[in-house]
Each structure stands twice: as structure tokens, then as C-alpha cells.
Image (spheres, grey):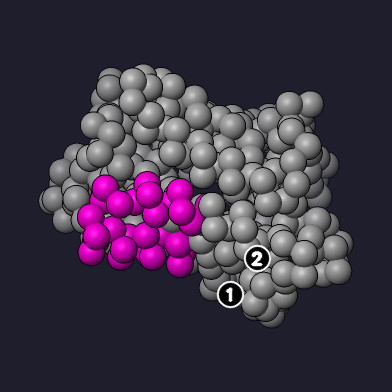
Amino acid sequence: MSSLLPSLAWASAQASGALTVASTGWLVSGLSPSPLVNSLLPALGALPALVPLPFRASTGYGLQIASALLLLLVSLKITGPSVVWPLLAMLLFGFGGQMSGLPLQQSLLRRSWTSMDQLRQGSTLGQLIGNLLTGVLFPIGKAVLQYLNAMVLLLPLLPIVWRTHDPGAAAADQGSSDGAASLRLGFVGRTVAQGALFGSLFGLLALWVRTVGAGNCFDFGMVLTAYGLGRTLEGSRLRPPLGPQLPYLLIAILLAATQLPGLPGWGSVLLFLPMGLLAAGSDRHVVVSLADRGDEPLRWLLLERGGALGGLLGALGIGLLTQVLGLRFALPLEVAAFAAAALVLHRPGHRGAGA
């Protein structure tokens, strides 16, 4: 089998995931104006990374397909207007991705169908396409068309899922012990803190765009696309040679700049491109700062786990605060949080709780 086809199938599944998550964020913002309810969506998405799940490709991928089907029923108004169903669907989708991601990657690599670089490129490309489709499809066919496409995008990887569960090629048979072992790594304070920053930033983004920014799903999709495109530029020559603290301060300035009087809507969207670049650079700074924790793959795993916990805490935190204070306070709180992070995180001698 050509290495191109499995890579494209993997990218298609990642596009489905991005389309599903972003579309559900917009769906929930229309079902409930409550900041706390909207913050539950990213919190539930982060939760599976903190649970010692077994690695099972077919079971996990089946959960993702079931989740997409449930969301399609919600978009067709078969389940009624309750926000419980999309929240449940996203929890199932997160569990499915956590269970199937690693064994599928292992299967693709073991059979020499693709390389790790190709998988990472496929993930980046897929996420960009998924975010772009979120904005493009909604004006055409609303959430129904979004979830139909999300289901179709899951299909190309199914043959590889079936092969992964062949008796001689079960890459996931390490079982739940692998998940438990990852939990024993613990958490590093600075990774949790950074995860809380970005978790709070995106926890209410859909509700903010809809309610405060008076935007639509196309605007929301373009914001996510610009941010994702910026993250892809981190390894290019466009990456600025910044220290570990300056990205937080610059993100605070860019967030404040989105509210400049007279700034057109497309100008606010474009500001998310350098935000993505700065966020990716900040991730790399955190990984470098963990040099005493092991090799680079392990450090990236620590960043991912700490980011998941922080993302959960950050999303719930901003949801609770804005539920009490009002949604209009969300942006000032975010600007203040990133400015404070520039003063506290990565300063000399700072290691953070759990470091």
C-alpha cells in the first residue's frame, strides 16, 4: 500500500475530529447562552486524557462514529433542544479518540505505510481542513451538513482500523496498563498553568463570537483556521526569536487589539494567526524547560497531559467567572491572565508546582 493513502486517511480522520469539535462548540453556543454550560464542552473534551483508558482501536473508533451519529441526530432536532446530548456526544468522542489514537499510529508505523513526520503533517493538515470546513459548510447546510461531512471523513480510516485489530497486528493490546503508566508521570506546574491559559481562551470562544462579537459560524471557523495556520508556521523561518515570557505578553496585546475601534471583522480574525504562532512557540519553550525530565517525546507527553488538566481547569474557571460577572468580562480576564503569565511563568528560578 502506498504511504500516501494511509497518510491521507489519517488526515481525513483528524479533519473529522476538528470539524466535529468546532461545529459542536458553535451548536452548544446556540442551545445555551450560559458561559458555564459552554465551558463544559472543552472541559469534557480534555477529561479523557486524564483517565487510564485501554488502547483499543476498533472500540475507540466505534465510539467516535457513534458520537458523530448522535450529533447528526441532534442537528436534525430528533433528540430535542437539550444541551445534554451534544455534551454527551463530545465526551464519547474524546474517549474514542484517546482509546484509538495511539494504536492506529502504531499500526501505521509498524506496517511502514507512513512515517511519524507524515502523521504529524497529516494531523496538522486535517485540523486546518476541519476548522475551515466548519465555517464553509454552515452557511450551506447548517449543522446537518457539518456532521454528515464529519461522518464521511471518518470512513477512509476504517480499513486500517480493521487491520489494526487483526490477531497478528493488534497494536493496542498493551491494554489499560499503558494508560495507567502514563498517569504515573504526574503533572508539571508550568504545563498545567499554560494549559489553563489556552483552555480559558478557547473555552468560550464560540459563545463570544456569537453573543458579543455578533458573528456567525463562518467567522468562528475562520478564527480557528487562522489560529491553526499560525501554529503550523512555528517551525518555519517566520518564527520570531522570542524568549519564553514574551509570547504571553504579545498574546495579551493581540487579544486586546481585537477590540480596537474601527477594526474590521477580518482584521480581528487575522490577529489570531500570530497568536497561533506565539502559542506554538510557547509550547516549545515549555518542552525545552523540561530538559531534566527525559527525552523529547516524554517531555511532549508531559506537556500534553499537563495541558489537558490545565485546559479542563481553565475552561471551567472562565465559565464560572463569566457566569457570575457576565460574558463581557471574559476578554479583560484573558488579557490580564496572559499578562500575568508573562511576569510569572518561566522567570528564573520558577519551576511551578509539581515540577
Q: Mark 2 points at which residue?
A: 190
Give the mark toward the camera: 2 or 1.
2
Is residue 260 in sight in this rendering?
yes
Task: Residue under label 1, please give it.
Answer: 52
Indicate the quadrant where residue 229 lies. top right
Q: Mainly helix, strand or loop, the magenta region? A: helix
Residue 322 magenta: yes
Asked if labels 1 and 2 touch by Cβ distance under 8 angstroms, the answer is: no
Q: Which amino acid does label 1 sit on?
A: Pro
- 230 inside magenta stretch: no
Residue 59 locus on image (x, y percent): 52, 60
Q: Report the residue at 75% width, 46% height from top.
A: 243
Q: Report helix, strand or loop for mark 2.
A: helix
In the image, what residue occupies the spot 60% across and 48% down?
248
Image position of 38 (left or right of 34): right
Q: Tell me: residue 34, above or below residue 179.
A: above
Q: Residue at x 86, y 69 (%)?
A: 292
